[in-house]
Image (tube, rainbow, N blue to C red):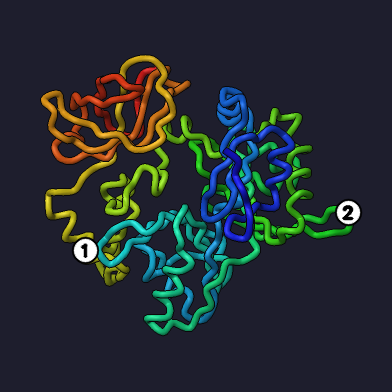
Amino acid sequence: MELIVGPRTRVTPFTDRAAAVGMTKAMVYNHTVLPIGTDDPAAEYRALTETAAIWDVGCERQVQIAGPDAHRLITYLCARDLRDLQVGVARYAPMCDHQGRLVNDPMALRIDDTTFWLSIADSDVLLWVRAVAGERGYGVEVTEPDVWPLAIQGPRAEDVVAAALGEWVRDLRFFRFERYDHSLEGRSIPMVVCRSGWSGQDGFELFLMDGAMGEQLWDLLWGAGQPFGLGVGAPNNPERIESFLLSFGGDTDSESDPDEAGIGRFVSLKSDDPGRAGHDFIGREALRARRTSGTQRRLVGVIIDGGPPMPLRSPRALRSPDGRPAGTLRALTRSPRFNANIGLALLDPPWFEPGAELEVILDGADRSATTTSLPFTLDS
């Protein structure tokens, strides 16, 4: 089956370069092509965990909120308190609807005093933000700017980015960023350089601010990275499950709230400062009610017996040994780190407690699944 791209499905400034160095598989994410794999997934995993990997994550679209009410709006949109968010700082900031259900789990960046980006997962946040801004009459402009992230992830990521952009990047702390214009043959490559990324490794995301310079930025990083073993890759499912990084819309369903998804610690339901009023955001009262209902599900780890399973194409039902429904298996991989089949399951109470014995049908056969807490702590 061939993936056809057109006005509804965009390529990124890096798509052709990623294909040229071995990316053979792709999917659509945020209406944009996302390369997801080569023909050698073991090499991708080794690059990410042993040296460094370059990822075309241009599908990680930015929703830009600019104007005098931008800070008020982003604070109201995000369940994490962003009232003290400073220029040059990024924060993981889940967003909920009025019933407390997850809308997205973006990274929020304050670009300047009146400009913010929401670096989003796969949902139409642009439409949601425009609707909320319009309904509340905020003085903002909400757009999708010409910004395209390119990630360098892995233990040698710092060396790669320093070789390409300069030693100054070594001083960037986690979830901090700098505006930077790189001069190359008389032309400028404008970007935001952020120490962040969707892996459990060290890494950077370079938010290119001129799509016409995509191939030049890729070539700069690719050349600088070869002495450090830079390889091509993509957001890596085995490594992110091992490290437990949430995949919004994959690990979650349309009813999931942040607590169920394992990211409740990023929700500010009360102020940490006794002298400060609590943070008001969309879905706050609904989340408070959900937390006291006793009916919430929970995303947990599962260890599944048997040989390496086929890729999980859709959620699978989990049941108790006596046949009662327990929830769904949302993600599954053969873990190189743990040499085991591990997955993520969204389970009803009481099945999400560690050590629960469940069953699931995979590859046409029953397999046993044992729940565990996250992140995984199996002996390697």
Q: At x 21% / y 44%, what residue is drawn?
A: 297
Q: Is residue 344 left or right of residue 192?
A: left
- Residue at the spot x=47%, y=34% of the render? 237
- CA gap, disc 2 and disc 1: 55 Å
Q: Residue 207 location in percent, x, y? A: 63, 55
Quarter of the picture containing the C terminus is top left
When the figure is inspected, residue 188 is found, relative to residue 230, above or below; the finding is below
Is residue 37 visible in the rendered image? The answer is yes
Point out which mark residue 261 bears: none
Residue type beneath disc 2: Glu
**Mark 2 packing: few (<14 Cα in 10 Å), some, or many (20+)?**
few
Query: On the picture, is 74 further left or further right than 322?
Result: right
Residue highlighted by disc 1: 286
Q: Position of residue 215 (x, y in %)?
A: 76, 49
For the residue pair 137 and 322, the one nearer the viewer reads as: 322
Residue at 72% x, 34% y is: 21
State the image quarter where residue 131 is shown. Answer: bottom left
Q: In the visual, does 156 lie left or right of 80?
A: right
**Residue linked to disc 2:** 185
Judged from this view, the residue extending furthest toward the top is 307
Residue 281 vertical position relative to residue 34 in the rendered view, above or below: below
Residue most extreme to the front = 1
Amino acid beneath label 1: Ala
Under circle 2, the secondary element is loop
> Can the viewer see residue 204 in this picture?
no
Q: Position of residue 325 (x, y in %)?
A: 16, 35
Which image quarter is the N terminus in? top right
